[in-house]
Image (tube, helix red, strand yellow):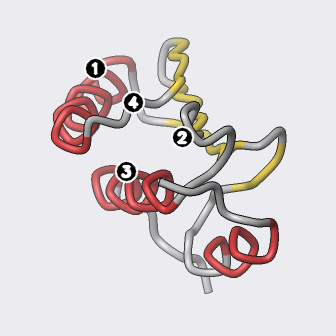
Amino acid sequence: MEKLNILEIEERLTHLIDWEYYEDALHTEFEFDNFKDCMSAMNRIAFECEALNHHPEWTNIYNMLEIKLTTHDAGGVTELDFQLATIINKIVEVEEID
């Protein structure tokens, strides 16, 4: 998989709610009602990561989940990162605010 250039990344970000690009990676943060809901989402995300064979860098503190996506083999963000970010948004049901 090839690393995307900044223009490709910025264009794809326009279709991805609540994600930012910096430090050669996609970043987001989710806040859940409680620890159990956060862990439940992380477990659902983990199954999708295994299916894609692509794994995030993430941290969890109580009800907060921070996720960083990058493709280490490519040295930056690839289409696979956007694919996983889209799946993650569906799992946590991110909604656009009008």
Residue 61 horizontal/vertical position (percent): 55, 12
Residue 35 horizontal/vertical position (percent): 38, 18
Cα distance in 3D space between marks 4 and 1: 21 Å
Identify the residue under disc 1.
36
Rendered image quadrant of residue 66? top right
Identify the residue under disc 4.
55
Viewer-nearest of discs 3 and 1: 3
In this picture, residue 40 sits left or right of residue 35: left
Mark 1 crowd level (few <14, some 14–19, many ≥20, 10 Å Cα): few
Q: Earlier in the sequence, mark 1 or mark 2?
A: 2
Q: Earlier in the sequence, mark 3 or mark 2?
A: 2
Cα distance in 3D space between marks 3 and 2: 10 Å
Residue type of the residue flagged with mark 2 = Phe
Cα distance in 3D space between marks 4 and 3: 12 Å
Cα distance in 3D space between marks 1 and 2: 14 Å
What is the quadrant of the C terminus in the image?
Answer: bottom right
Viewer-nearest of discs 4 and 2: 4
Q: Nearer the viewer, residue 95 or 55?
A: 55
Viewer-nearest of discs 4 and 1: 4
Identify the residue under disc 2.
30
Residue type of the residue flagged with mark 4 = His
Identify the residue under disc 3.
88
